[in-house]
Amino acid sequence: MKRRTFLIGFVLVFSFMLFFCGRRCGRTHVQVNVDSLFYDLGKERLAQCAKRADAVFTAWERNGFNGVVLFAEQDQIVYEKAFGFRDLNKRQKDSLRIDDAFQLSSDSKMFTATAVMLLQAEGKLDYDDDVRQYIPELPYEGITVRQLLHHRSGLPRYDAMADKHWPDRKKPFSNEALVKMLVERKPEPYGAPNATFFYNNINYALLATVVERATGQHFEDFMRERIFEPLGMEQSYIYSMRDDATVSLYMPTDVHGHDVYRGGPVKAQNDYLNGVMGDKIMFSTVGDLWKFNQAIDAHILLPDSLQVEAFKPGSAEWKNNENYGFGWRMSLDHPDMYFHFGWWKGYRSVVVRDEVHQRFLAVLGNTTYNLPPDAMWEFVSDTSLCLPASEPWPMQ
């Protein structure tokens, strides 16, 4: 704001000098368009920000990044670009596009949490309800919906349980199969409910089941009708194997995940655990993720009094300086930033929301290339080229 005030003062003084000189010299008065000047300054600053972003992510591409990036600031998309290809094993490679949908992996959790928050807002559940109010057959006592949201249930990992007890890997493993296996096998819990934070995918898989039991709808239908369609997230969906008798060789998508080995990338095959929803398996684009971020700011789905719950730490302790809200991570090393990382079967992703500088970053990759965290945080935290917070710079 001070910088903008200084520039306005400078322009006014400069205009007065030109006017005075014109009167003394008998010349025509020079008109200075202040709005036009700020428009040019805005375009220049946006161009500088975009150039900086391109340097960062082009360096990633040289080191193996294959995916799509969107960076926004002050309600404006500053930079978006696609790097590489959809299927790295094709002879005639098909280039990635900005509007391509990627599997979000664990970044799906912020959307599952939103579904639960919508039901809380409508009075269809309460965060402090016992989970057995919705899944009465669950053989564990004292676990609440809130504890699932905050990863404080103490429940065991479902993937390890399924790997040990699911006999046919060609048959999809579903959310209902997960609950049934918990009932039949009752594996030893990790700890007592609410004793400690332990990030565990089973929490959000069970939340998807809670959504289904509380609404009577399939999880994928609820997400489409209540979140994706209202926000115009036209390319987003929950991948469902509900009606599949067998696991297909590959997921039916244009953008395939790839495992990267020394010999080169290998297209990741579909997996029997992809039948479990809530903790992963949502597909989306960087543009749709940007729409979701804008909807949070505009309180389209939830009022601020409820939305703010997503960004409150769920644990009194900060384990390794980190905490967890409702589907969002937070860190003492990066205050006022809310984020999530995702990795699953050939896909990697990251979503960062900076509420102080009004920044948003979405990176979606379709290889196991490890997105460099230090470089990412340095980029997001660099305020040397911040756009003014007073109002957005005009764009064409």
Image (cartoon, rainbow, N blue to C red):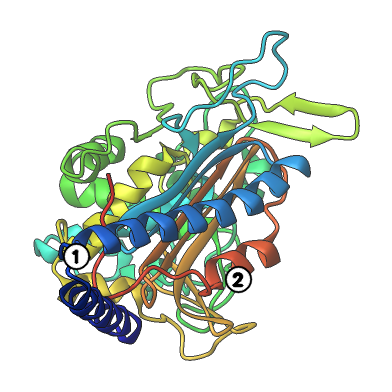
Where is residue 148 shown, x and y percent of the image?
40, 67
Closest to the camera, between mark 1 and mark 2, is 1
Looking at the rendered structure, the kind of residue marked 2 is Tyr
Q: Looking at this view, is 92 or 157 the one in front? A: 92
Q: Secondary structure at mark 1?
A: loop
Q: Position of residue 113 (x, y in %)?
A: 33, 59
* Numbered disc 2: secondary structure: loop
Residue at (50, 61) in percent of width and height: 340
- The disc placed on residue 92 is none
Viewer-proximal residue among 166 and 50: 50
Please identify the quarter of the rendering in which residue 139 is found: bottom left
Farthest residue toward the bottom?
316
Provide residue 396's location: percent of width, then percent of height.
27, 44
Residue that label 2 marks: 190
Which picture quadrant has residue 393? bottom left
Q: Label 2 crowding class (10 Å Cα cut-off): few <14, some 14-19, many 20+?
A: some
Point out residue 94 in the picture as x, y percentages from the top left corner: 59, 16
**Quadrant including the N terminus:** bottom left
Query: Residue shown at 84%/28% (left/top)?
Result: 264
How many marks on residues? 2
Q: Residue furthest right?
A: 262
* N-terminal label among 1 and 2: 1
Which residue is at the far left? 122
Image vertical order of residue 382 relative to residue 119, above or below? below
Q: Nearer the viewer, residue 114 or 351?
A: 351
Return the residue found at the far top: 92
Circle number at residue 27: 1
* Distance of label 1 from label 2 (alpha carbons): 84 Å
Type of amino acid at the residue the image marks with label 1: Arg
